[in-house]
Amino acid sequence: MPPSSPKATMHDVSRLAGVSKMTVSRVLADPDLVSESTRNRVMKAIEQLSYVPDRVAGSLSSRRTNFITAILPTLTNSNFADTAQGLAEAMRPADYQLLIGYTMYRLEEEERIIRAMLARRPDAIVVAGTTHTKAANEMMLRAGIPIVEIWDTPEHPIDHAVGFSNYEVGRAAALHLLALGHRRIGALGSRMDSDAKDLRGESRLAGFTSVLREAGLSDELVIRAGQAPVSYDHGALTLGILLEQAPEVEAVFAVSDISAVGALMECHRRGIKVPGDLSLMGFGDFDIARQCVPAITTIRIDAEQIGRRTGELLLQVLDRSSARECAPAAAVNVGFELVTRGTTAPAAKPR
Amino acid sequence: MPPSSPKATMHDVSRLAGVSKMTVSRVLADPDLVSESTRNRVMKAIEQLSYVPDRVAGSLSSRRTNFITAILPTLTNSNFADTAQGLAEAMRPADYQLLIGYTMYRLEEEERIIRAMLARRPDAIVVAGTTHTKAANEMMLRAGIPIVEIWDTPEHPIDHAVGFSNYEVGRAAALHLLALGHRRIGALGSRMDSDAKDLRGESRLAGFTSVLREAGLSDELVIRAGQAPVSYDHGALTLGILLEQAPEVEAVFAVSDISAVGALMECHRRGIKVPGDLSLMGFGDFDIARQCVPAITTIRIDAEQIGRRTGELLLQVLDRSSARECAPAAAVNVGFELVTRGTTAPAAKPR
DNA sequence: ATCAAGCATGTTATCGGTATCATTACAAGT
DNA sequence: ACTTGTAATGATACCGATAACATGCTTGAT
């Protein structure tokens, strides 16, 4: 570590420029308030001292940190990374900095993170998911800052929401497989009794199951095994379980493309033809789903857009809240899209 | 946004508990300094008021923010996301919060981000890459905090470094292709004259080229086209350029698996057999490289480990620097590994 | 000439913690 | 009995900025 000369403060700058601290502050925050000549003098002093303002002090004084907390299950899922990037992108022009935390799909971890984050006094909270622990809910409410729940459509939103209906995604998947003429239909998801659970994946399964029931079909083939986050192995494993239970299964929906890819590979290994012997679909439209052979039928969501829309919403809300108006809670539904590709095909023998 | 009751401060807690602010502070920072009875009283008051300490104020006073700045090219590349996650994981037990910024592979953007980040007074900086603008270098030096350059091995490190030699990666790739008996060898990279450039990719190309030269081969087939970050399209595009220039090319190294996958798909489309007609290899050991058919020969780096090792290093350094000792600059080389898979095979007709 | 309005700048009082030193009380050593 | 040490707590002074109000000086309308 290089030796550090003590950092210059605003006071040092003001002395060198022969003005008061406030004038320096104004030059930085709102240059138009200062006459050109003094402004130049101050700028020169800043340059000379290579002064970097201290936002910690600034935040304490102004009671605005320009931090936005973003709480996601993981960064390692490209969809969530896209959302983070979209959000950061949208907030950057207004000089907001993201404080990213990830929960590993654990609600208790989410609570811990929210507690820790609130101590940093963020100006807003963005959190993936609509289910939180009681304590987490209370903390967020009490924080008195805008909250945006993303990646699902909450029934009882805390405040704002930007996402899509995972339940409807599940229904769309089931309807697609039904429309192809399949009757023995299964699904692959993760366990819900462990501490790391994918609540949004479970919503998709719930929607999926609801359609099966409405069609008078059994939901026995909806497999829940392994912990979130799902992996290629998860897909291979759960497909194995499914086949053991019901070798005659015709169509499968995996809660994630990652699982779907793993399942597809397992089919290759077992000599099961996809499609033909088995129709397979996933969720998320990951790159890998597009590049697989055959390319996987999936449901596309625009993860980056979720982030961007959230950012735009927050900019509005934060602007208004500084003007002391109360912004109405908004609920944005960004929708989704079924992308039919090579792994789903009509049932071989129509009833 | 819910209505906010004014947040409780440490002073409120101290009054309710009938002690001084300092005692409350001690209960939070070092409970053993306080007698059990008062500690309990204070804890109860904290609970009652649902007091959340203000770390902004704490940081200003103690001159430690417990922020670590991490500057990466993008979060959308799973390798960098892994590094971020590894770093966060390692720092979490010591209650450090990551401040993530991404440069989009632009040095000017990196400089801008560094300037903005320094205003947050981080306790350390982690930055991907070893090349920075002059101003960025100076700012980092002057900051007087530990700096870790990651994802490469700097010749002139600013301070610490954790990474691997991209140059040697390129050499290993070329040696592998040479050893297979190939002579007409090309490579796919991105342009270096645009504002977004992949400097580490370029190092790999440089290493690759050095081996070609030593073997008396031409480096004409090293293609640089398109902007960083590379994409599937980039791979397809640059392979097209290469084939136009040299239809008889036998082996190709792509600076990234992403490019390699794109190139592989392009080969499929053109009816070029991989391997056989063409040996192809990539870099990064992305999931998709493993799942492709055939699976892509690549060079594996442990991105998550880079993050974790960086975190461990920082914990040591930060601990020591608070004890006023000067930690020696460390340079950790995490190495890499050639993973031979299905896309590279011995040359058809040995010379 | 007079005065309100407005621009440019300065003064003062926090923001909510922690560092540092001071104080008190009581136990133990001589 | 008297010093000395230690454990528990308090008092005071910042940390480095900004908010809010105050001041002085122009300028232009009347």
Image (cartoon, coloured by chain):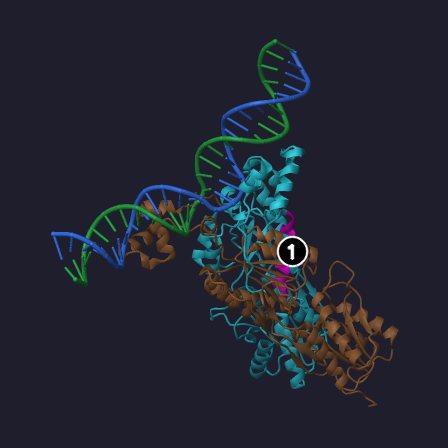
Chain colours: A cyan, B brown, C green, D blue
B149 shown above or below B221: above
The answer to whether any part of residue B114 appears in the image is yes
- The residue pinned by badge 1 equals B136
Q: Position of residue A38 (x, y in %)?
A: 64, 34
Q: Between residue B242 and residue B201, name the one nearer to us.
A: B201
The residue stretch that appears in magenta:
A77-93
B124 shown above or below D24: below
Three-letter amino acid code at the position of disc 1: Ala
Q: Secondary structure at mark 1?
A: helix
Number of marks drawn: 1
**Which quadrant: the C terminus of chain A?**
bottom right
Q: Chain of mark 1?
A: B
Q: Main secondary structure of the magenta part?
A: helix
**Which quadrant: the N terminus of chain A?**
bottom right
Horizontally, residue B212 falls left or right of residue A116, namely: right
Q: Position of residue A312 (x, y in %)?
A: 63, 49
Residue B239 on the magenta span: no
Q: Position of residue B95 (x, y in %)?
A: 47, 61
Horizontally, residue C6 falls left or right of residue B349, namely: left
Q: Position of residue A251 (x, y in %)?
A: 64, 76
The answer to whether any part of residue A104 appears in the image is no
Question: What crowding class fits label 1: few (fewer than 14 Cα within 10 Å), some (14-19), or many (20 or more)?
Answer: some
Quadrant of res A174: bottom right
Q: At 75% across and 76% down in the image, what residue appears?
A: B208
Q: Between residue A17 and residue A155, name the one nearer to us.
A: A17
Q: Between residue B288 and residue A217, name the one nearer to us.
A: B288
B152 shown above or below A322: below
